[in-house]
């Protein structure tokens, strides 16, 4: 198999309301089954997900976490507002309202003007479907769309590209039942295809001042479906790492509670 | 930027002692700065890391973990012998003697004959350097080598390709100090390059019966060094997820201990 991956050149600074599909269609000659990969930052910008940092009033919890993380309490408040639960206080790892787990709820302060923050798209799977449909309309080509962010990982240094939304491509490829070279059934064989696609695209997209937030992967044979990235997110019940982190936080909280009780007693 | 990634075709079944560099040199026309990616399974096979499952006697701990994981106790004993510490009992997530954290110490039972297991290469960074040097000798080309495995992840379903060894390419690209499009300094910017390379290669290598365990990535500009993959492995001290998992296991162990004490008392 041979694939190629290339960036779309001369992508302008994206503004609210920009038609990302048109920007691609004007600059690249798409083929059927291409995978068109967008950095979530530009999808967010096009969708007007930029907010003024000063537009929010931090709570006591945000102030405490800000101190711990040497961050602006207003930034941390945005993180909390975009999270359903904190998994680690420092770094601030959260379960986001979007379904994924990541540092700072995926909120970006780089690649945007000072004083502003950029939230993840409201529903990246929906965004991916919309862009995919619009690309079909403009070019007649049936493509897949993947929206990416970069995440750190447990156990390993370095951030890598991951998918936060997708359309027209199965996020995971369930190969249980397939056989290996010796005819044995494969044991653990759910492949995280869109995350691999995101990593491949992130290699060439860069994160700094390259300004190449769109990449196209061509020649890859993939399973097609429209279930989105959410099938890839583990539930609390099946995620033992999450459970360990929740328990650790609960334990620390009750230990603080005991410490405080002791203090009150000794002061009383 | 444009890169291409393609598999090396007609790779034979690898046997102990096979010259992997020659297998590549005979089948592909390498260019300077290519990244040649090998599935760890074939590196292991060439290095004679295949062992007879029956050659080991399981301990009580292995039997207990085998029951929990519905696994062969002998297989589990191999996992324990290749680990320095257990992080989760089921699935059996371990800190390996090779430095990485993964399920079952990366021991493979698929893609090898029945009754055998395949350990990870003893030192995948060294293996990568040796293959890289031999490729230079055979072809005159200066390339990078990455050795890959597939791993599951916290929080997300699906396995993806990760690097377990590398030579001639920096495992992480430290971009702290670089600026974004608006001239702000990037905040979190250590990119896990070789893991992205591994994911990209894994997209096309496949895990089942494709028999394409070698891929070449061409056209990618990367930072070169020979520090290997180990710079990418977090230490126990800096890894909060590891700490939470260790604590959880310790707590469960002491809770079992308390239960047993209770039983002894009530029986006494």
Image: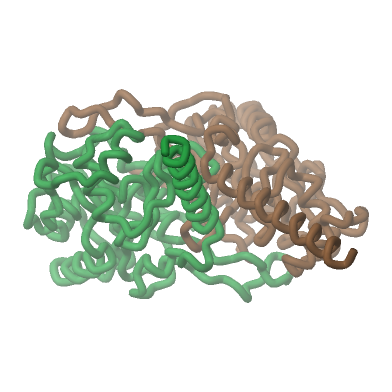
Chain colours: A green, B brown
In the displayed structure, does residue A260 sit left or right of residue B130? left
The percent coordinates of residue A176 (x first, y second) are 60, 73
The residue lying toward the viewer, choosing from B203 and B94, is B94
Residue sitting at x 70%, y 65%: A181
* Number of marks in picture: 0
Who's the residue at 37% across and 58% down the image?
A100
Name the residue rendered at 48%, 31% in the picture.
B33
Q: Quadrant of residue A92?
A: top left
Give the quarter of the image for residue B233: top right
In the image, taking residue B231 as reference, residue B64 lies left or right, namely right
Report the quarter where the C terminus of chain A lies: top left
Specify whether residue B29 is in view.
Answer: no
Most foreground residue, A159 or B254: B254
* Residue A171 in sight here: yes
Q: Nearer the viewer, residue A165 or A56?
A: A56
Q: Is residue A115 above or below residue B92?
A: above
Q: Residue A135, position in %: x, y?
A: 19, 66
The residue shown at (47%, 36%) is: A266
Residue B206 is situated, as x and y percent measured from the top left of the image, at 56, 60
Q: Where A166 sits versus A176, above or below?
A: above
Depth check, front residue: B151 or B84: B84
Horizontal placement of A9 versus B113: left or right?
A: left
Q: Position of residue A138 (x, y in %)?
A: 13, 67
Q: Name the outermost residue toward the front.
A: A268
């Amino acid at each position: 198999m041979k694939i190629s991956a290339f960036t779309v050149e001369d992508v302008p600074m994206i503004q609210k309301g920009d038609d990302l599909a048109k920007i691609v269609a004007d600059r690249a000659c798409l083929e059927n089954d291409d995978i068109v990969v967008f950095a979530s930052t530009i999808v967010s910008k096009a969708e007007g997900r930029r907010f003024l940092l000063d537009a929010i009033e931090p709570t006591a919890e945000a102030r405490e976490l800000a101190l711990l993380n040497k961050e602006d309490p207003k930034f941390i408040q945005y993180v909390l507002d975009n999270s359903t639960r904190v998994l680690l206080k420092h770094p601030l790892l959260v379960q986001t309202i979007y379904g994924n787990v990541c540092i700072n709820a995926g909120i970006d302060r780089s690649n945007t003007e000072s004083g502003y923050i950029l939230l993840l798209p409201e529903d990246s799977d929906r965004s991916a479907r919309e862009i995919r449909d619009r690309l079909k309309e403009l070019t007649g080509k049936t493509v897949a769309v993947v929206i990416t962010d970069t995440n750190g990982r447990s156990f390993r240094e370095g951030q890598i590209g991951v998918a936060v939304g997708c359309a027209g491509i199965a996020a995971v490829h369930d190969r249980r039942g397939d056989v290996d070279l010796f005819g044995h059934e494969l044991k653990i064989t759910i492949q995280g295809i869109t995350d691999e696609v995101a990593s491949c695209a992130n290699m060439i997209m860069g994160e700094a001042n390259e300004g190449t937030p769109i990449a196209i992967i061509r020649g890859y044979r993939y399973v097609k479906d429209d279930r989105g990235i959410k099938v890839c997110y583990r539930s609390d019940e099946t995620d033992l790492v999450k459970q360990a982190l929740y328990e650790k936080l609960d334990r620390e909280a009750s230990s603080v509670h005991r410490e405080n009780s002791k203090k009150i007693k000794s002061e009383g």
